[in-house]
Amino acid sequence: GVDEKTFHPGSGGDLVRARLGLTDRPVVVCVSRLVPRKGQDTLILAMPRILAAVPDAVLLVVGGGPYEKELRKLAAETGVTDSVRFTGAVPWSELPAHYGAGDVFAMPCRTRRGGLDVEGLGIVYLEASATGLPVVAGDSGGAPDAVLDGETGWVVRGGSAEESADRIVALLGDAELRRRMGERGREWVEERWRWDLLAEKLRGLL
């Protein structure tokens, strides 16, 4: 479930953007632990294709983890260091504002190790939807269950930089599409994923 009172469109994203010097730039945000399954590397590999269409776009990677050194190296090797920002781990209290700093949320997660390393539900997509962002999700495990494909965002093939880039470019280039998907995502969270609704469902089952 999602606390829709904590994650909401007015969560303070403008302040984070201003602090990071991103006020006038289109921002693709990914909030997650930095591990290979999550797909931050896929987003970095997608950046040249994104930048070809949206030259001032920036990827905001929020979170810490053991994969950070490799991701920074990949950004350098891909030639997109100036268009990728790493925040490191941030306090939980600041997470809603970091979601809100984005125009699009993307985490193209993928299944690894023959199915042993797989995404669960993907609560980050729901938190992003509650914040009013359209989402781009990978097709690993339960991640697609956290997206209404074509309504609150899109599900792409995990690990595909091309599919990820194409969906992100489509969203960055269409403010009305972002607004519509973001609003539908917020509605869906309020209709289906609020903690009080889930608690009542559990009470009924018990």
Image (cartoon, helix red, strand yellow):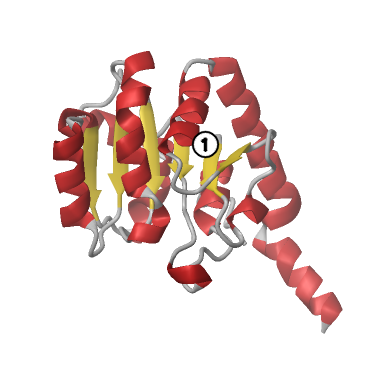
Residue sitting at 54 percent across and 16 percent down? 174
Quadrant in which the C terminus appears? bottom right
Residue 5 appearing in the image: no
Q: Quadrant of residue 120?
A: bottom right
Identify which residue, 174 or 137, lies in the foreground: 137
Q: In this view, does 137 lie above or below 67?
A: above
Residue sitting at 69 percent across and 43 percent down? 148
Say whether residue 57 is left or right of residue 184. Answer: left
Q: Quadrant of residue 44?
A: top left
Coordinates of residue 54 in the picture (x, y in percent): 36, 16
Q: Is residue 20 above or below residue 176?
A: below
Say whether residue 57 is left or right of residue 96. Answer: left
Residue sitting at 50 percent across and 34 percent down? 163
**Residue at the extreme bottom:** 206
Residue sitting at 84 percent across and 79 percent down? 205
Quadrant in which the N terminus appears? bottom right
Coordinates of residue 74 in the picture (x, y in percent): 20, 44
Q: In this view, does 36 lie above or below 52?
A: below
Say whether residue 107 is left or right of residue 84. Answer: right
Going by the numbered disc 1, the residue's amino acid type is Pro
Coordinates of residue 15 in the picture (x, y in percent): 30, 33
Residue tagged 1:
9
